[in-house]
Amino acid sequence: MKGFMFYCILFAAINLYAMPLSDIKDRFNDRSILAMDSLPDVLAGNHADLVESRLRNEAIMKFSEHQLPDNKKDWEAHRAQLKAKLIEKAAISIDHKLPLNIRETGEIQMKGYKVKNIAFQTIPGVYATANLFIPDGNGPFPAIVHMLGHWRKGKIDTSGPQQVGQAFALNGYVCLTIDPWGSGERATTHGDFEYHGSNLGASFMNIGETLLGRQVVDNMRGIDLLSAMPNVDANRIGATGASGGGNQTMWLAALDERVKAAMPVVSVGTFEAYIMRSNCICELEPDGFTLTEEAGVLALVAPRAIKMCNHKKEEIPAFFIPEMIRSVNNARPVFKMLGVENNITYETFDLTHGYWKENREAALGWFDLHLKGVGDGSSKKEASYETIPQEKLLVYPIGKRDPDVVTTAVYAKNKGTELRKAYLNNTTFDLARKKKELKDILRIQEPSTLKKAYSSKNVDGWERIALETADKKLIPLLYRSPSGQSQEYIIFSHSQGKRHIPENLLNEARKKGLGIAIVDLSGAGETTSATETEKGMTYHTLSRAELWLGKSMMGEWVKELSAVTDYVKTTLKAKRIGLDGTMEAGLAGLFLSALEGKGDYLILRDAPVSYLFDNRDSVDFYSMAIHLPGFLKWGDVSLAAALSGKNITMVNPLTMSGRALSPSQLKEYKTEFETVRARAKQAGNTVFQ
């Protein structure tokens, strides 16, 4: 029997080793393996969505707070300040003098126009792929920057992108269609078209940038390119796009005054509607909702022209027609104050999400009025065109892309490596300053101070407590008192909730006579939000909502662990407290200790040793909660460990994409953690198991 069991275990281990990492993660998250189904709930069954209701209410309040000035003097001051802040938060930095170095790889002559396949330099050493649609004739022509959203094939897609370019070219416009970061020919593997958002796009934040900001820079450089063309009138440039491309259109028009007219399609709504609703990381302006509502961004376009096109069959709540109308109505007084009330308008269509023929014809009429000075702005019938085979619109043959077309993965890793090199070259650290900076990065404005504790009936030896905090949270907590004379507690947390904590960890703590406290952090376990339904993108919705509102999921978890630690220390009379967190929750415990010195010792399980981008294939191993804007500019996990001054055990330390460390990597990180702690002149040590 023992032999049979041995071979069963061996067979299971071999199968586990052979699995792809994503499948292993699914196995680890399978309740049949890890779940503590015996753990009781703390909160009443069938309760409301606590996280969504709290954040939605906060968003409603924010919308009401943001009002635009009603006189020109105040508006001009507000406009300058708001524009500067939006640029700062999106990390937009551009060098208009950087050579474009346009590389043309092919030309397609069509009836009435031609298409050039090009790549051009947007930031030093980084090139974007694009199609340039040029009408027959000498010009000078007005021009359009056409921005794309979530078409995985980018500019070559036949379901919208190439038709827009053709429609404009046949109507006498030069049209530049750029592949967005991570889409089309800028995907990780050339020809393997992928979604550019989620954890991949969010990786820009860890290096102090944003996907939104990188796209705005690309599009500004697109205007540089069009303005430099001898057959383009640089004073007559417009912008358009749908969905994420419409979002880019709004931001480009707001921040670059060279855009004389714009038409965002199926994209304008309200920031309020973004909160706990599904949209892409490419549409996220960190802290944006603390600065303004979407009406404020639209108002920045004034006195230039902007027209919104939204659809009646839209499925994304953030872009519903009533949301768009709210923003237009709140922005219109600024246009009216400047004497150009007709320069902001909208049109609705009985269509689904997309950039359809009706939108193209609306765009032709709108841009004819504002860039050519003809017509009344109403729709203009588009000319017939012939679909171009997708392969002809590729800048490079599949698999033969120029390495200067840098992908998100390569850029994030290279930039992260540069930042880590600069960080590790520091020989001393100003601890007080570093703690303040970390608090700012975590976006911790106020603590989650305890307001009240609600007790429920003991179940199977577990005391059930709901902790109410001053910032309107309800934190589910289970605990068992220590046995014997021990006054030591260990607080367990897991980024996916208490039922993912292995039972053996709790049994080991009980055998040692330790008190046990188990917490469900916001969005996890009993507080899971029903909005988190997108497979492979855990906390995709919640993490963006927190960032829009000037917070971060990691920062909120730090605050909650702080409140729980206070409760265990003051109410349960613990003399010694350990923090044991798995995956991202382990980092939350580490950051708490670094900031407040809480926790007498720390255990981090399956946590990353560094925020350095590691591997595209397994980039979704950790959830969206892990990302912290500017973290690698601040330092890295090793600095947080040093600031804690505590003994830390990292069990199964991993890379940022959840891969096991090689022996050489483990050795390097051990040295790094020891060196940084020594330079910070802090006590304690970090042990890797």
Image (cartoon, rainbow, N blue to C red):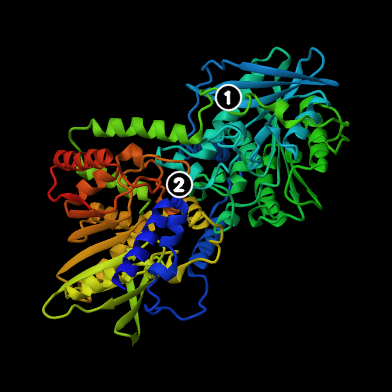
Element carrying mark 1: loop
**To which quarter of the image does residue 568 belong?**
bottom left
Circle number at residue 483: none
* Pointer 1 or 2: first along the chain: 1
Residue holding disc 1: 400
Near-viewer residue (101 or 153) = 153
Q: Mark 2 points at which residue?
A: 618
> Label 2 is placed on what type of residue?
Ser
Tell me the residue at 49%/35% (across/down).
Answer: 408
Residue type indicated by callout 1: Lys
494 with respect to 128 (left or right): left
| Secondary element at image label 2 | loop
Is residue 487 placed above or below 393 in the rendered structure?
Answer: below
Q: Quadrant of residue 389?
A: top right
Is the residue 667 above or below the residue 652 in the image? Answer: above
Whether residue 449 can be seen here: no
Horizontal and vertical percent position of residue 421: 29, 31
Q: Do the residues labelled 1 and 2 touch (CB within 8 Å)?
A: no
State the count of labels: 2
Label 1: few (<14), some or many (≥20) within 10 Å? few
Residue 281: x and y in percent read 53, 46
Q: Residue visible at 30% across and 42% down? A: 662
Q: Residue at x 48, y 70 (%)?
A: 50
Q: Can residue 218 be seen in this view?
A: yes
Q: In this view, does 137 lie to the left or right of 260?
A: right
Q: Which of 411 and 242 is in front in this view?
A: 411
